[in-house]
Image: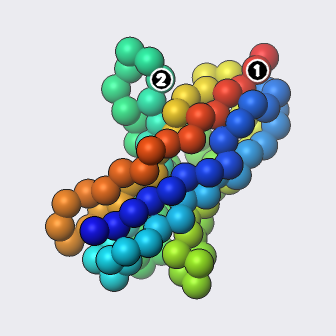
Amino acid sequence: QVQLVESGGGLVQAGGSLRLSCAASGRIFSINAMLWYRQTPGKQRELVAEITSGGSTNYVDSVKGRFTISRDNAKNTVYLQMNSLKPEDTAMYYCNAVTTGIPYWGKGTLVTVSS
């Protein structure tokens, strides 16, 4: 199994920044990619950013140029640096691990951006 714990969410004013962290433990070697999703009430979970085991990254168009996904292999941690935050970025952010078996999810961290 893989355990994921997110942290770093909070309340920030529009234009501000936050850095989310996702610490992974367990069968780390089975992870092929790490992803960040977000979800607001009544809406489907949206893929925000991903980073593969090879280091390739992808972003949803709405966050390109503002968000950066990165990882620290020594700490088994993936980060999501979020700059120039907008009220529409308000959501619960979830970390997801794509593995050789089933995917794993963290419990989420709440990001609230005030206008």
- In the depicted view, which residue is nearer to us: 103 or 26? 26
- Spatial distance from mark 2 to mark 1, Cα to Cα? 15 Å
Numbered disc 2: secondary structure: loop
Mark 1: give few (<14), some (14-19) or many (20+) Cα within 10 Å.
some
Horizontal and vertical percent position of residue 67: 64, 48
Horizontal and vertical percent position of residue 92: 52, 33
Q: Earlier in the sequence, mark 2 or mark 1?
A: 2
User: In the rendered view, would you say 18 is above or below 57?
Assistant: above
Numbered disc 1: secondary structure: strand
Which three-letter amino acid code belongs to the residue tagged 2?
A: Thr
Mark 2: give few (<14), some (14-19) or many (20+) Cα within 10 Å.
some
- Can residue 69 be seen at all in this image of the molecule? no
User: In the rendered view, would you say 85 is above or below 65?
Assistant: above
The label shown at residue 40 is 2
Which three-letter amino acid code belongs to the residue tagged 1?
A: Ser
Horizontal and vertical percent position of residue 52: 40, 69
Q: Quadrant of residue 90?
A: top right
- In the depicted view, which residue is nearer to us: 100 or 61? 100
Check contact, mark 2 vs mark 1: CB within 8 A: no
Q: Which residue is mark 1?
A: 114
